[in-house]
Image (tube, helix red, strand yellow):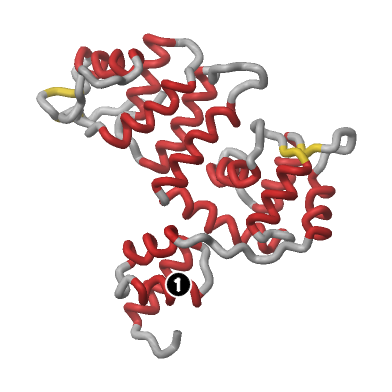
Amino acid sequence: MNKLGRGHRDKVQQFISITGSSEKVALQALKASDWHLEGAFDVFYSQPQVKSYADTRHVEELYNRYKDPYVDMILADGITLLCNDLQVDPQDIVMLVLSWHMKAATMCEFSKQEFVGGLQALGIDSLEKFRDRLQFMRSELKDEQKFREIYNFAFCWAKEKGQKSLALDTAIGMWQLLFEEKQWPLVDHWCQFLQARHNKAISRDTWSQLLEFARTVDPTLSNYDAEGAWPYLIDEFVEYLNENGIIQKGHLNDWNQKC
């Protein structure tokens, strides 16, 4: 990389910091996109990622470090210890991405199969590799398709066992976490609306359709189709925005109150 000009070196470092890739991969993607960063990201995310080798014995040693002493699973205490080792907050969205990779069935617990299989797929067999992969996992949220998959995964992952719907408080917490990443300007108004008008659990249909609404409908509602096939709750939300003067003459008023 020493032969590169400063501008190109900076782009390589920026690409590596966002994707968690190697310098070789960064150079290949940037050269393929004629040194345009956005194009390089497209190249990177469109290619199947080569998984590095993970030593099964070392992965199982990691599992044994975190598993519950009485049950053959990793439970809340083990996840807290894992977060401490990784130096991340348990509420950090990267833990949701990790759970998605592990195909975890329930929040705050990993079966041995989920944990070991997930780490093997990520090429992780040591805490050092674990920490190194965190930036890559964060970068996956920038990929539209992966974000959609992680968003949809979060519904089943966060709901109580045996329940078909997601408790409202839990749903609001998940939306705030996910849409902080996507920066949907109406998320706080949506939370306020639910607490004021709905106050019930959230169905899978509402959960999935809200992402589509946030993705396709302008925050000023300029392209909102009242005849569209949105769930009734989203139609009521639009009425709430208009009734409360949050949307006026195609403009989103600049006042946000947190949920």
Q: Which residue is depicted at the point 41% across and 51% down? A: 142
Q: Is residue 174 left or right of residue 56?
A: left
Q: Please, is residue 59 above or below residue 201 in the view?
A: below
Q: Quadrant of residue 14?
A: bottom left
Mark 1 packing: few (<14 Cα in 10 Å), some, or many (20+)? many
Residue type at mark 1? Ala
> Which is more toward the observer, 150 or 13?
150
Q: Is residue 141 left or right of residue 248?
A: right
Q: Position of residue 49 (x, y in %)?
A: 54, 61
Residue farthest along the left direction in this orientation:
249
Residue farthest along the bottom direction in this orientation:
3
Q: Please, is residue 45 above or below residue 23 in the view?
A: above
Q: How many marks?
A: 1
Q: Please, is residue 235 above or below residue 49 in the view?
A: above
Question: Which image quarter is the N terminus in?
Answer: bottom left
Q: Position of residue 82 (x, y in %)?
A: 71, 47
Question: Which image quarter is the C terminus in?
Answer: top left
Residue at mark 1: 26
Q: Position of residue 238 (x, y in %)?
A: 25, 18
> Which is more toward the observer, 154 or 12?
154
Q: Which residue is depicted at the point 66% across and 31% down? A: 106
